[in-house]
Image: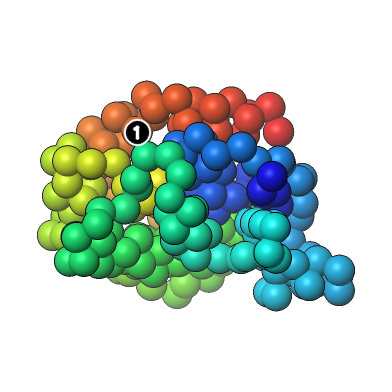
Amino acid sequence: MLKLYGFTVSNYFNMAKMALLEKGIDFEFVDTRPSQAGDFLAKSPMGKVPCLETSEGFISETDVIFDYLEDLGQGPALMPTNAFEKAKVRELIKQIELYVELPARTCFAEAFFGGTVSEETKDKARASLAKGIDCLKRNGQFAPYIAGASFTYADIMFMHSVSLAGACAKRVLGMNLLEDFPQAKALSDLLATRESSKRVAADQKAG
């Protein structure tokens, strides 16, 4: 059986967990924090979560875990088979990660951990987040899912990254990321109705 290492507050752990639930693949949860300890670095070379233990060894990085799960050929497909459509899903995943989540992360210390960040950092985050959201407006289809008619890994990334970035932006930057983005708000509401989403949210709250 696969083993998923991480903890329920981690949005990237929750992405991998949601993918496993959507696929209907049995797995064991191993409650684990990021660590630079040697035994964990042998599992996850950067010491990050999530990582996935398979019968052949360990895999880290969430988008790589997505690809592995898809290549197993179990459960419903969460990636198109057409080469161009598959590339568009991966493009959206990368754009959400680089241009929405990462700018928001520069302010996470103040948003969630009781720290402070400089006004310069906040100004850069505001500008970068605005560009990132504009990118999604241009590239997302929202028909009703972000890459079109089918639920994909890009929706999992959207759900767990955009919501976290939005919470950070509201607390620290005075921004409502989805204020003039009704398609994204509708998608967020739709994704919240999925059984996998409800399970992840309940486990996150309990944890």
Number of labels in the image equals 1
x, y percentage for residue 163?
A: 41, 44
Q: Nearer the viewer, residue 72 or 203?
A: 72
Write the residue at 86% across / 74% down.
38
Q: Nearer the viewer, residue 185 or 176?
A: 185
Please say if 13 is above or below 18: below
x, y percentage for residue 30?
A: 76, 46
180 on left or right of 31: left
Any part of residue 17 in sight: yes
Please say if 206 is above or below 13: above
Q: Which kind of residue does numbered mark 1 sit on? A: Leu
Crowdedness near tag 1: few (<14), some (14–19) or many (≥20) residues, C-alpha within 10 Å: some
Q: Nearer the viewer, residue 132 or 125?
A: 132
Write the residue at 47% across / 31% down.
196
Q: Which residue is mark 1?
A: 191
Any part of residue 105 in sight: no
Write the residue at 70% across / 75% down.
45
x, y percentage for residue 168?
A: 47, 50
Q: Quadrant of residue 90?
A: bottom left
- Does dot 1 land on a helix, a strand or a loop? helix
Write the residue at 54% across / 53% down.
12
Name the image quarter holding the N terminus. top right
x, y percentage for residue 81?
A: 24, 57
Name the image quarter holding the C terminus. top right
